[in-house]
Amino acid sequence: MVNKKYNLFLAPQFNKLTNGAKLRVDLLGDMKIKDIPELKGFTIKYVTKGYEDLVKQGNLLVPRKVRYIEIFKK
């Protein structure tokens, strides 16, 4: 099993990553949005900063940064 250092959640009105899609991005550890391969072909607009907290991954507490973004084709 591969542990990704991020999670992408699409808004309910979108079923895939398309122009104008709104997402919630959970970044685990020291991950950055620019390092997510699925978002490489898009320009990112930050809708709101979101929040930061700790989540349990295995037996460790890992910092999580939640960001709300909108993506557009480059």
Image (cartoon, rainbow, N blue to C red):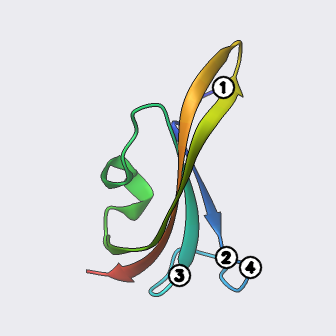
Which of labels 1 and 4 is toward the front?
4
Classify the position of the C terminus by image quarter.
Answer: bottom left
Residue at image point 33% right, 82% down = 73
Which of labels 1 and 3 is toward the front?
3
Side of 72 relative to 63 (left or right): left
Query: Farthest left residue?
Result: 74
| Amino acid on which disc 2 is placed | Ala
Q: How many labels does the image show?
A: 4
Q: Is mark 3 on a helix, strand or loop?
A: loop
Q: Position of residue 40 (x, y in %)?
A: 32, 62
Q: Name the residue under label 2.
A: 11
Q: Earlier in the sequence, mark 2 or mark 1?
A: 1
Which of labels 2 and 1 is toward the front?
2
Q: Do the residues labelled 3 and 2 touch (CB within 8 Å)?
A: yes
Residue 21's disc is 3
Q: Which of marks 1 and 4 is nearer the N terminus?
A: 1
Task: Between residue 28 and residue 14, name the one nearer to us.
Answer: 28
Q: Name the residue under label 1.
A: 1
Separation (CA) of disc 1 from disc 3: 28 Å
Separation (CA) of disc 3 from disc 2: 7 Å
Separation (CA) of disc 1 from disc 4: 27 Å
